[in-house]
Amino acid sequence: MKFVDEAVIDVAAGHGGAGCVSFRREKFIPFGGPNGGDGGRGGSVWAVADRNINTLIDYRYARRHEARNGEPGRGTDQFGAAADDIVLRMPVGTIVADAQTGERIAELLEHDQKVLLAKGGDGGFGNLHFKSSTNRSPRQKTPGWPGEARKLTLELRVLADVGLLGMPNAGKSTLIAAISNARPKIADYPFTTLHPNLGVVRVGPERSFVVADVPGLIEGGAEGAGLGHQFLRHLQRTRLLLHMVDLAPFDEAVDPVKQARAIVAELKKYDPALHSKPRWLVLNKIDMLPLEERETRVKEFVRRLRWKGPVFAVSALARDGLEPLVRAIYEHVAAQVPAEPSTDPRFTDEAGG
């Protein structure tokens, strides 16, 4: 399935049905009085988050979503039927905004979260509503209220705990395939990854976290080079960034330190908040280096980069050094999740002050 993370749609709620002017007409009842019913409510348009959907492709081609109008009222006290609502199922992590004003309407962050996009119009009043002691035969009625209509932009930002960041061919796809259930395309040429991939890393029973792999970023991405910055928004909800670096590039003229600095610069250009997120350094492909040179090369890289944060030297292909990395990631992510308040009465304020 094609990965689509942006879409523009038009939603229109149904109009309310008009009220009815009618009078009771029966034999031997010359003054039956008004009996015109109200119109029915127009259908509304709702958005619902669905964790079983991972792309907005359904809204790339079906852009108009219009609910039905409510039925008009009828005589003999019959109210018009309300129209059915329309439910648009979207991936968890979708941001809905007004295309005209840019106002953010909702963020769908939980499964089955429901948000009203366009409210259906209320039905009009029939003349049954206007009868009184001084107005025995009212001929007033009101039309139905119009339903809301909007042009909306949909933007998907995947929900992940950890995001992988780095140059093309740094080994991000190999790493996510080694530690999680994700099976991305892996090849020996740049830009193998063309869309974000999500993988669940199982650390133990009921202990897991989600990793997101996005296409590689290169120098000049802000100016449109490579795939640019179009997928970096998928890292904005992560709690931790793993900056992966190819420590043993095939081209000897390539300087890994220069590449790492370029990635950090592009990240800062895109979003200072994303740049300020916790970021760990993962030096990949150490299996390509002689065993006696590995520690020296890692220390030299850290010294030249002037890196002060955590550093992990791994080989995603050989699965060397991955266990300490996964364990450290889980401890970091778990520490940031707020603990649920205890329901045990022994730990409440009422129990013993």
Image (tube, rainbow, N blue to C red):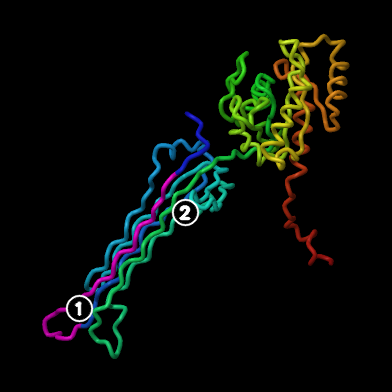
Residue holding disc 1: 23
Which span is picked out in magenta?
A: 9-32
Q: Which quadrant would the C terminus be assigned to in this image?
A: bottom right
- Mark earlier in primary sequence (1, 2): 1
Q: Is residue 114 above or below residue 311?
A: below
User: Is 261 left, or right, of 3 in this rendering?
Assistant: right
Q: Which residue is at the front of the view, 112 or 17?
A: 17
SS label for mark 2: strand
Amino acid type assigned to the residue bearing label 1 in the image = Phe
Q: Which residue is at the front of the view, 58 or 219?
A: 219
Residue at 36%, 55% in the rendered image: 84
Q: Which residue is at the front of the view, 106 or 84?
A: 106
Examine the structure image and report whether residue 18 is included in the region drawn in magenta. Answer: yes
Q: Position of residue 5 (x, y in %)?
A: 53, 36
From this viewpoint, which residue is outermost toward the front?
223
The quadrant in which residue 189 appears is top right
Q: Give the CA distance from mark 1 to mark 2.
A: 38 Å
Residue holding disc 2: 117
Residue at 73%, 46% in the rendered image: 337
Residue at 74%, 55% in the rendered image: 341
Amino acid type assigned to the residue bearing label 2 in the image = Leu
Q: Residues within 10 Å of mark 2 (few under 14, many from 20)?
A: many
